[in-house]
Image (cartoon, helix red, strand yellow):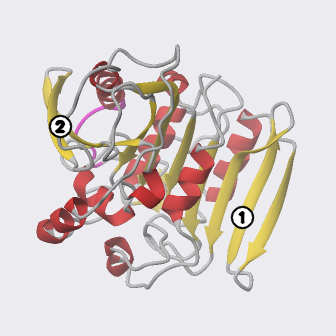
Amino acid sequence: MRPISYTACIIAALATTVFATPRAVTSRATDGCGKTHLFNGITQYHDLTSSGRDRSYSIHLPSDYDKSTSYPLVLGFHGSDSIGLFFEVDSRLSESQFSANKIMVYPDGVGGAWAGANYSEISVAEDLQFVTDLLNEVRAGYCIDNSRIYATGISNGGGFVNTIACSDLGDEFAAFAPASASLYTDNAGVSGGCTPARSPLPVLEIHGGSDASVHYEGGEGEGGMEPAITEWLGWWAERNGCTDVRVEDSFEGDVHHSIWTCGDGTEGVLQHWKVDDMGHCWASTEINFSQIAAGQGPTHIQASQVIMDFFDQFTKP
């Protein structure tokens, strides 16, 4: 994903108003409960040191954030040649209609990218350590429900979300939802480069059938080899012990929603949305910057709503 106008991003980000639904503090809440924060409802920017390197991220709290309420936490990972601010504005995930009762965090990759691609500037191990350090800092400063931590992202960031899911760090999360994912670190079969910390592990992926950057059928990508999406989904079906899948078609056959039955018979632990005529973008029923960059208009589905609805179904055991 390419950078978009700073001015447009900042205006859109500051225009967001968020309202939270209270939830009592539980035993799974973090040490950050009880700490007061100012300027809630406005995205704020922070630095932290990880692996001896200066890193950055932004955080968006509900406008009526309650220091005694434990909130779900969602990490959103931008695409390549980008920053967290651009992903926040493009996806609109900080808007109350999508995350009224959630804390949103948008990390920044080194050199505008996440580890795993051949153009990445740092190792997978270092970026995973950054996410670990980030989680520790956010838990210490804010009231987080440890059982409801999630990750989503687009393109190179979506691929890194899958990298987290395939690592020991994945056990810190309740569910994952990559979109238009560049799956450079998970292209060698069921166990080739992917060892989930538990099974079943909830995963949802959204992809365009006409994606010209991360091809649905796989092959050589901008940052290395990528698997066919159907093949990759088959690997996750096996990892999650999935037995059956049903497909719901809509919008005159342009949209296909695949839902697997996995593990103990629970339906929907593994899901996939394919939009045949969608390119490399964040799916939205209203025009966004990534759609403009892909040379297309709005899509049939709203990824931000689909993903938040998916996250709401899962709590970490």
Q: Which residues are magenta?
A: 119-124
| Secondary structure state at the residue bearing disc 1 | strand
Residue 256 percent across, percent down from the top left: 71, 69
Quadrant of the snapshot with the N terminus: bottom left
Front-most of residues 165 and 248: 248
Residue 172 percent across, percent down from the top left: 50, 24
Task: Give the mark nearest the N terminus, 1 or 2.
Answer: 2
The residue at the point 67 percent across, 36 percent down is 190
Tell me the CA gap for discs 1 and 2: 41 Å
The residue at the point 17 percent across, 67 percent down is 11
Q: Which residue is mark 2?
A: 38
The residue at the point 46 percent across, 41 percent down is 151
Name the amino acid, label 2: Leu
Asked if residue 235 lies left or right of residue 305, the reply is: right
Name the amino acid, label 1: His
| Secondary structure state at the residue bearing disc 2 | loop
Q: Which residue is mark 1?
A: 257
Residue 164 percent across, percent down from the top left: 47, 33
Give the dominant element type of the magenta stretch: helix, strand or loop. loop
The residue at the point 84 percent across, 59 percent down is 246
Label 2 packing within 10 angstroms: few (<14), some (14-19), many (20+): few
